[in-house]
Amino acid sequence: MARDLAAVWHPFTQHAQWPADDPLVIDRAEGVYLFDTDANRYLDGVSSLWVTVHGHAEPAINAAVRNQLERLDHSTFLGLTHEPGIRIAEELLRIAPVGLEKVFFAGDGSSAAEAAIKMAYQAARQRGQDRPLYVHCAEGYHGDTLGAVSLGGVELFHATYRPLLIETRMVSSPGVLSAGQTRPERAAQVLAEMRSLLEREGDRVCAVVVEPMVQAAGGMLTHDRSFLVGVRRLCDEFGAAMLVDEVATGIGATGTWFAVEHAGVTPDLMVVGKRLTGGVLPLSAVVVRGWVYDAFLGAPDSGRTFFHGHTYTANPLACAAALANLDLMHARGTVQRAAAIGERMAASLESVAKYDGVVEVRRMGTMTGVEVRSVGVRTGFDVCRAARRRGVIVRPLGDVVVLMPPLGISDDQLDELIGALDESIREVVQ
Ligand SMILES: *Cc1c(COP(=O)(O)O)cnc(C)c1O
């Protein structure tokens, strides 16, 4: 740890505080468990920041990566192609909502969000429309690069950079309710706000950008499906693209392959990341409708090319991991299992939701946020720390304790996770 503190700067970490928080050095992982260098075992309750699907060290994924490594470690996707990249694109189109036709790869969620943001603008421009504006939601999160931050709405993360950002119009969060309001009422209210905005400036808007069903980093804020149905209608009416960020929700977490399925809508651009490789390697993608792709076609000197891409785009090892992950998910019925895990979580959190110290339990499939009443400077953190003493790793978003178990978690392990959370909440806020 001393060597870490001497050399390393960690993401989303206040280093003036961190050494006093007694950080762990993680040594290895197996299944749903992480082990530190003192051989203590911890249940990975946030699936290593929302990525682990079947569990750590999944033999089939490890074997796929090893085999790929022996055959082709890396080759650029700029002007060349390879089998793992082609196959994972085909697989993504097979599971994506009907109507999505082409896959553009990136590395992290942010880099795919960034690509999608540029695509939406350029596609409109090449269809003869000047639409330099984006509409997005308060409490949204799309990553930490500047385009993604421009479309973010989490003040704590994003306010600092405002002078640097592209021009957008932000509507209220569909997941933050006023007193006595239902989620469908809130959805209708935010849609009305979006409509009046689009009536004023809709002909300048290239895309409406939303996290479907759950605003995850904003605090696991869930909204009604009617919100997505309404956004789809407004996009059609005003000629804007519907750009959904499925980085947190996609690949099974909500009990469907993609969260837009809950609303039965097909977006124009869909961003996928996090769970795609099963949690082993970074790989993200933008999956688009044909009209988006077609807007970029033209002669080499037409300037219509998408001049965008990253050095390690579609890295074959990451593609091989993703293929093995999706194969396993099909074979094991992981998406249906995720829905069942969600139901079990709902049942075991019923008593927790009734504690005085708990403001609200929000959940969509396995994606769960337990908002605790603030009783100190870092109540959410204190609950997570208490859980760590009970052998469970969870992370707070402010005073929202996030549970995002690996989809391969067993019922017993789920009980272990919820049990530790229950005790920790009682210890800290009850
Ligand atoms: C995590 C996340 C991102 C950013 O992905 P990175 O891989 O961290 O760059 C974007 N959008 C959503 C909804 C996310 O949850």
Image: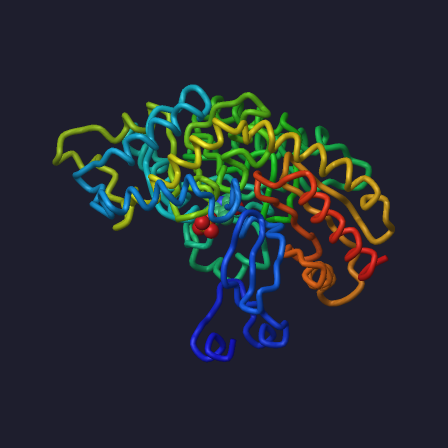
Left or right of 51: which side holds 426? right
Residue at 68%, 38% in the rendered image: 411
Give whichever of 182, 324 is nearer the camera: 324
Estimate the x, y position of residue 272 in percent, counting from the top left: 44, 38
Left or right of 181: which side holds 324? left
What quarter of the picture does the C terminus occupy? bottom right
Number of callouts in the render?
A: 0
Give whichever of 315, 302 is nearer the camera: 315
Residue 149 seen in this snapshot: no
Residue 64 seen in this snapshot: yes
**Vertical arrangement, residue 415 with respect to residue 357, above or below:** above
Residue at 33%, 31% in the rendered image: 89
Left or right of 34: which side holds 176? right
Q: Determine which quarter of the picture holds residue 334.
A: top right
Q: Determine which quarter of the picture holds residue 427.
A: bottom right
Residue at 40%, 36% in the rendered image: 324
Give whichever of 273, 316 is nearer the camera: 316
Estimate the x, y position of residue 49 in percent, counting from the top left: 54, 51
Give whichever of 47, 63 is nearer the camera: 63
Estimate the x, y position of residue 346 in percent, counting from the top left: 74, 36
Estimate the x, y position of residue 370 in percent, counting from the top left: 72, 48
Residue at 52%, 22% in the rendered image: 265
